[in-house]
Image (cartoon, rainbow, N blue to C red):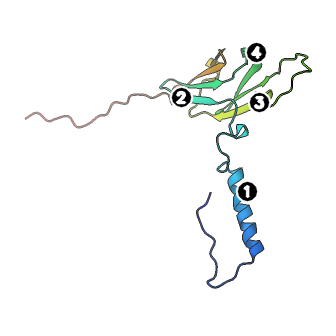
Amino acid sequence: MSSLIPWKKKGALEHPVASLRDEMNRLFDSFWSGEFLPEKFPFARAFPSVDVTETEDAVVVRAEVPGLEAKDVDLSIVGDVLTISGEKKEEEKEEKEKNYTHREVRYGSFSRSLQLPASVDVENVQAECKKGVLTVTLPKTEKEKARKIAVKGDSPEKK
């Protein structure tokens, strides 16, 4: 969002409709950029929620996937982007007498893509799903691992 203010000629009168138009443009710009959406709106949050940590040897992605099992989740890596996708299916029970007054549990397919902070060895990626938490361990490629480099300098002269 830009903090620049449009320049207007001194003494120029602005039409009220133009002022309304500018305010509406600002409102829509802030809405679509995400600044307008409070965290409490369910659709404002990405699913699944993730934590990405980086160690010397690997990138670890932990994703909350409550109610899902390993067979319900798909992972793919293209370049430096990890995509987590799957589908949460609603239990099919015939309960005609149930009337919901409030419903927050989501069902359906989902997909979340994350740009990885380092190049990873795709052939050695490991993934595990336990108790609704998906843990993906992505080992770094050799060129990404930190190496200790010896620093050479002048040796002290003997007198």
| Amino acid marked by disc 4 | Lys
Q: Nearer the viewer, mark 3 or mark 1?
A: 1
Residue denoted by label 2: 53
Frontmost residue, 63 versus 149: 63
Q: Earlier in the sequence, mark 1 or mark 4?
A: 1
Inter-mark Cα distance, 2 to 3: 22 Å
Q: Earlier in the sequence, mark 2 or mark 3?
A: 2
Q: Which mark is residue 71?
A: 4
Badge 2 density bin: few <14, some 14–19, many ≥20, Cα 10 Å: few
Q: Residue at (89%, 18%) from the top-left corner?
A: 95
Inter-mark Cα distance, 1 to 4: 40 Å
Q: Nearer the viewer, mark 2 or mark 1?
A: 1
Residue denoted by label 1: 28
| Amino acid marked by disc 2 | Thr
Q: Residue at (63%, 71%) from the top-left corner?
A: 6
Inter-mark Cα distance, 3 to 1: 26 Å
Q: Earlier in the sequence, mark 3 or mark 4?
A: 4
